[in-house]
Image: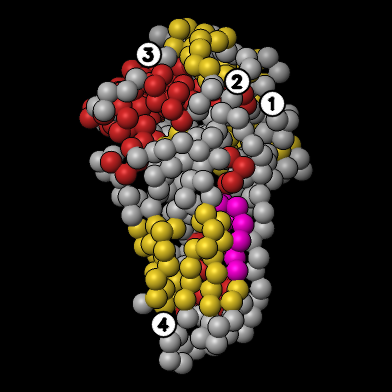
Amino acid sequence: MAAAAAAAALVAGPVAPASAAGVPESFTVDGSGFGHGVGMAQYGAYQMAREGRTQGQILGHYYQGAQNTVATTPRDIDVQVYGPDPYGFSGYGDTGATRIDVKGGSWLLQAQGRAVARGSGPLDVSVSRGDLVVRAEGRTHRYDRMWLVWSGSPYYRQDAAPAVAHVRGAHGAYRWGRLQLSASAGVPNVVNRIPLNGAYLYGLAEMPASWGAHGGRAALEAQAVVARSFALLRSGDWKARCRCHVVDDVRDQHFTGYDNEVSSYARYWADAVRATNASLTRARVLTWSGRPVEAHYFSSSGGRTAHSEDVWSSEVPYERSVADPYSKRAPGNDYRSWGRLLTQESAQRLFGLPAVASIEVTDRYRSGQAAALVATSPSGETATVRGSADRIRSVVGKHTRAGTLPSSWIARIRAN
């Protein structure tokens, strides 16, 4: 969901050994927080809940000016759980064939409005010459689109023992709704059609449900509202490439389906979702000027959230920088502070200098996130890396030993 605002200034340069006096072998990047910094800090929301704030107060703090209201929603949403990337993001999407196993019961395969196969064994799903091919129970079926339903659901043998569908390569398992099978870009495309205010929200794994057992019920309710708001906005954007509204990972929201409903603390998340539901088509959402908002959220801040335009490219009126002391007070937050190693050789590549003696954060955004880093060589030559908070995080992170940076709340960079 992120788009970098300004490209950081990087210059390729020679790499020299750290042998001269005053040239450290490495640096440590000290920082805090985890994530992009826009919208609600989840650990911050957790601590606010522990301190007695309601979901309305939490959302009012992180999304100032947005309306928290009950609105009409579609009944169903189409979630791609396997298939090609509809967004064009590098490194995402599935390739090749897959297999579907329906465990605990039987299944029915439908095409062109009629049943074409029944069984209980695995279904092998592939694409051949642009056609969807399903091989099951010793027979092969070719259609443009098929629907898979299973026992114990409203679509097939409702009174039978409930079955659960497992799609190889997907992020979860599927007890509810039905699976639409098609071909797209030479890859099987599998979509779970389910109720938005029901199985979709219950299947989201975006915030630890265990927080509900430790004073975090209001944080879970706030998460349910923002997750629903995001899904409601996406429900108006049906994508032909995937025949879906959303995908099941961080490109939209992390959906694990029935796996999330049977986790140890699942009941706390389910209770939070129900508390913000009025019905399958009426529920609490965040809006701005009467429209659902794309309410971003992230793990924890370094003490203050970010203006949206400092991280990405556009100014969003309800995603303004606000104080967030709560993230650093929240129990279990392993990113209150962190350090990442930057070798001398990596620092040279990052700044394009023959040697780096020191690195300073010379400019910051309102949030405290780094906006510019200046490196100085032993001879006094300087080089600057500047960009959006998201770009700083990405560029500096890929040069560290870990290969990533938790956030761009960089406190300092010290020589070792």
Residue 60: horizontal and vertical position, in percent? 45, 23
Please rate how many residues cluster around mark 3, counting C-alpha atoms within 10 Å: few if below 14, some from 14 to 19, many from 20. Answer: some
Q: Which residues are magenta?
A: 384-392
Three-letter code, disc 4: Glu
Measure the C-alpha gap from mark 3 to mark 1: 28 Å
Q: Earlier in the sequence, mark 1 or mark 2?
A: 1
Q: Which residue is mark 3?
A: 275
Q: Which residue is mark 1?
A: 238
Does the magenta run of residues contain 386?
yes
Q: Earlier in the sequence, mark 2 or mark 4?
A: 4
Residue depicted at 66% across the width and 44% down the height = 313
Q: Nearer the viewer, residue 385 or 257?
A: 385
Q: Is residue 331 left or right of residue 405?
A: left
Q: Which residue is mark 2?
A: 288
Q: Nearer the viewer, residue 90 or 340?
A: 340
Q: Could you tell me which secondary element the residue under label 2 belongs to?
A: strand
Three-letter code, disc 2: Trp
Q: Which residue is mark 4?
A: 25
Residue 218: horizontal and vertical position, in percent? 33, 23
Does the magenta run of residues contain 340?
no
